[in-house]
Image: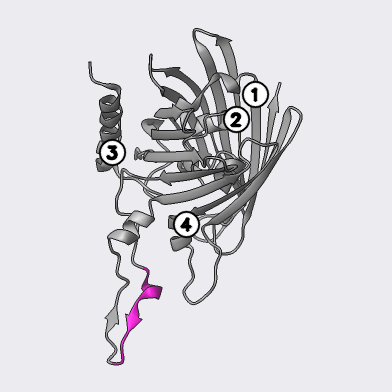
Amino acid sequence: MLPMSQKFTFFIVLLVSYMGFAQVGGRATYQFLNLPSSPKQAALGGKVLTDYGFDPTGAMFNPATINVEMDNNVSLNYVNYIADVNYGTASYAYLVDRHTQVIHGGVTYINYGNFNGYDERGNSTGDFSGGEVALSLGYAMNIPWSDFYVGANLKLISSKLEQYTSLGAAVDVGIIYVNPDLKLNIAAVLRNAGTQFTAYDDVYEKLPLEVDLGFSQQVPHVPLRWHLTFENLQNWTLAYENPARSTTDLDGNTTPENINFFDEFIRHTILGAELFPEGGFNIRLGYNFRRGEELRIVDQRSFAGISAGFSIKFNKLRLSYSYARYNSAASSGFFGLNLQL
């Protein structure tokens, strides 16, 4: 038997070994699976893997966080994403018994709105719409005599874009280390490993697989918890040369943007912080470096990459809100409700 520390190291190496399946936005189908699942996720930069508490929404990103504190909690979240595109999530956790612990269920949907349809000659073919939904069922367990927890989600996915439909399935596998003395959480997740059962047309597409690593800790004697997430570890190359950032000297020679090691590293990084994380009212702030770089406009001040939010508790009801910018034209507000039944 391997020591627990070696088992954890082996698990991390196994996740990172999926780099050969490198996929980011625009290279796979069912991209809605990687959208933030709650206002807390959105406010803290878009991804949090270490939220080991009462909110069942956190288990939609890392099933290893499913725990008894989530029992009989329901979470409902909604965001007007971009233009007429809106999406939302719902999740619920139930304690079956102390032996089997907690079963978690969730749903994620996205509605792309209505579009005017035209054929290749410009003749109207009527309006059409598109939408996608994913149903998930998850379970987690404690590795005996340790502070490690492992979990998995099974997701069934349905998509309809105009007259084209697709069905698929995916699994999430996660692990988390919870140290109550240091108030330190460390987590790793393999998300969206799966396949299409039926393709939109004749071509079967890859799913948006991700490998993520997360850390969080509450600062001693200070009501502050910091979050650090490294996303898309399956693909080191996330940066692209932006022609608008190239430079031209007096002789007319053009030098393209230089993408170095630090540029690539920082695009995998997300930072977040919660003030009064265990209180009835808390404030959240995050920064997504990749989003900030991709939406940055040359010679113009932009708040791209920054996100913020808060939550407030009324007895058994907690309301949450976050603000984030996902495109250069507008921002999105994310609303959430968590209720202990």
Against 16, is 83 above or below? below
Of residues 151 and 330, which is closer to you in this image?
151
Is tag 3's residue or tag 4's residue first in the polypeptide sequence? 3
Quadrant (top left, top right, bottom left, bottom right) of the C terminus: top right
Q: Comparing marks 4 and 2, which lies closer to the viewer?
A: 2
Residue 260 is situated, as x and y percent measured from the top left of the image, at 28, 63
Badge 2 density bin: few <14, some 14–19, many ≥20, Cα 10 Å:
many
Name the residue tied to disc 3: 16
Helix, strand or loop for disc 1: strand
Is tag 1's residue or tag 4's residue first in the polypeptide sequence? 1
Name the residue tied to disc 1: 73
CB atoms of marks 3 and 2 within 8 Å: no
Of residues 192 and 85, which is closer to you in this image?
192
Q: Residue furthest bottom?
A: 250
Q: CA distance from mark 3 to mark 4?
A: 22 Å
Q: Amino acid at mark 4?
A: Arg
Name the residue tied to disc 2: 55
Against 102, is 166 above or below? below
Against 203, is 141 above or below? above
Helix, strand or loop for disc 4: helix
Is tag 1's residue or tag 2's residue first in the polypeptide sequence? 2
Q: Residue furthest left?
A: 1
Q: Amino acid at mark 2?
A: Asp
Name the residue tied to disc 4: 291
**Span shown in magenta:** 242-250
